[in-house]
Each structure stands twice: as C-alpha cells, then as structure tokens.
Image (cartoon, rainbow, N blue to C red):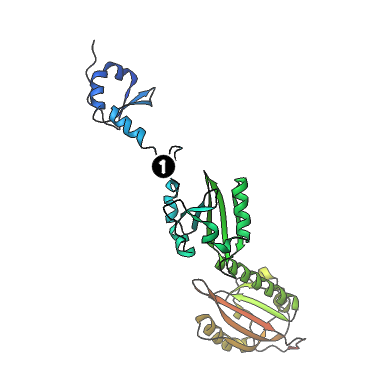
Amino acid sequence: MQDTPEQPVSGQQAVSAAEFVRNFARLREVALQHPVMISHHGRVSHVLTSIEDFCRAQAAPCAGTPGDESPTALFDLADWLDDAVLACNHNERIVYANRVAAALFRVRVPHDGGTSLRLALPAFYDSLLEVNFRHTLNSREPTTADLPSPFTPGNWLNFRCVPLRDCTVMAIRDITDEVQHLRLADVKKAMFDALALNGTIGCARLNVRGAMERVDDTFCNWVGVAQDKLLGVPLLNLIDRSDRARFHEGMERVLSGTGSLRTVVRLLPNRSGVLAVDCAMVQLQGTYGAEGAVTVFTRDGGPVEVQASGSQ
C-alpha cells in the first residue's frame, strides 16, 4: 500500500528519514524553494537545500567563526557598554576603540590597521595599567584591578584586561565616586569609634520619627540602659519632662530640615535624678533625601552633677 503524498513542508518543519526516502522526488522540488530539514529519531540531523543556497552559505561565514578575518567583528556589542574598550594587537597597535574610549581618550582608529597605543595614550606607559596590560599580553591571563588613574590625578579606574583571539582587550571605567564614597565611609566609622573612646561624648542617630537607630556605649552608660533596649525608642522619652516640649520643638525643626539644634537638656537615666548634657543635633541627608538626624551629647569634658529631677 502506497503512502499518501504529504503536503509541502515549510523551512521550519522537519520530515523523518523514512518520509524523506518515500517522498524524495517531491521534497527535492520543495528544497529548491526553501531548505527541508530531515530528522532521525526526532532530532534534526540533515538539511536538504539547493546548490545555490549552499554556495552562498559557504561564502558567508558567521561573525566570530575561525574563518572571519575582520579584527572588529566581535566588538559590535562594545559600543553599547559604558566602559571605555580598547583592543590592541600583538604589536601594541589599537585596532578597535568603542565610542566611550573615543570620547575619553580621543582615540581614532584609522582604516589602515590601527594606531600606536604609545602615541595615542602616552600616559598609559610607566603606569600600573601598563603592568597589568603587559601581564595579559605576555601570559594571556585575564587581569582585573582598581588603580590610580594615570590620565587624571586623583581619579581611580577599574581596569580589566582579557585576551581575545589575536587581540588584548582593555575595559576601563572611572570609579572615583565609588572610591571616595568608601573612603568617606571609613572616615565616618573612624570618627564614630573615636568619639566612643573619648568617654565624655555620646552619640545617637535618629530616624525620621525621632526614634534611636544607633547609640554609642557612652550614651548607654549615661542613661544606664543597654543598647539593644534603646533601639527604636523615641529620644524624647529620655528627656526630662520640664525640657521635653522645648526639645521636641527643636527636634522637629531639625527633622523637617528647617534648622539645627543646640541646647542644654536633662536626660532621665535609669536611676534617681537627672543628667544635664549639652546637645547638638543636625539633619542627616541621604542619597534620596532626609534620613533622620545625628545627635551629639557632651558633658563639658568632666563629671556633671546629677541634679534633682523635674516633675515626672
């Protein structure tokens, strides 16, 4: 019994090897219009196409294949990156520079095979960037480092260097803002630690509602309450009632960003009496707006007498 002839297949469909044998004459005609894929046990293994299509495919290798001789064929994506990307050949000639590198370093790659890296970026040589570049150039091992910029004094660069076929590719990104942010963060922590060691200065960080988010050991010792018990507690709760209304008004001005506060208030320690301290408070500004306030308390460099508490 002869099988019913099948309908013409599209280029996205596949016929089984058995169907191909049974309907070879028809499928040969179909292949003149578009390729016919042939499957074996459900997996495509061969393609039947015309000689014209086959010759065209042979004459146009895909980008990135060993047959592609264009030195910039793999760098189309680099023009979409925010890093400055430079590619050099073994003679240290720049064969590619993306739009960021062209803007930052004024590098223009001519059509005659590249420009000298030494002539284009003289400051690059005798710098730590050259050391990392030369390591990758000679060993073909990738390198990554955060380094001082040889182009702009005081700036920092993230430098990545990788081998790519016959080229050595450098990606350079300015990280000055990130480095300065980290260094400023270290300064803030060191200052906070130094204040804690002083013993006569207490610090508290308040959120936008006036509750304590961070307090140092000195302040905890003054009020006689452990740190974990103070977190989340409104600072106003530790102010003597006779000073509370005045302190609350000043704190609201600070938190709203309309002023700062410098006053003498009496704290209520976890014992009898009160503790007079000099209080200074300023608003804490974050990246996206106000994040609360920072409060510093001092005891004038020496012991302060515990005064009688006001009305409770």
Nearer to me, 65 or 71: 71
* Residue in the image at 34% along x and 34% along y: 57
Give residue 295's position: percent from left, percent from top: 62, 80
Give residue 252's position: percent from left, percent from top: 53, 83
* Residue in the image at 61% along x and 57% along y: 130
What is the three-letter code of the residue carrying label 1?
Ala
Q: Is residue 257 left or right of residue 196?
A: left
Residue 224 appears in view = no
Give residue 261's position: percent from left, percent from top: 58, 86
From the viewer's perspective, is residue 106 above or below residue 40? Answer: below
From the viewer's perspective, is residue 40 above or below residue 94? Answer: above
From the viewer's perspective, is residue 300 above or below residue 221? Answer: below
* SS at badge 1: loop
| Label 1 sits on residue | 63
Residue 118 appears in view = yes
From the viewer's perspective, is residue 101 above or below residue 16? Answer: below
Give residue 113's position: percent from left, percent from top: 45, 50
Q: Residue furthest right?
A: 303
* Residue in the image at 43% along x and 59% along y: 99
Q: Residue furthest top?
A: 1
Q: The C terminus appears in which quarter of the rendering?
A: bottom right
Label 1 neighbour load within 10 Å: few <14, some 14-19, many 20+: few
Q: Which residue lies furthest to the front in this view?
A: 112
Q: Is residue 310 left or right of residue 122?
A: right
Nearer to me, 300 or 305: 300
**Across the whole image, how many numbered discs are drawn on residues?**
1
Q: The N terminus appears in which quarter of the rendering?
A: top left
* Residue in the image at 57% along x and 87% along y: 245
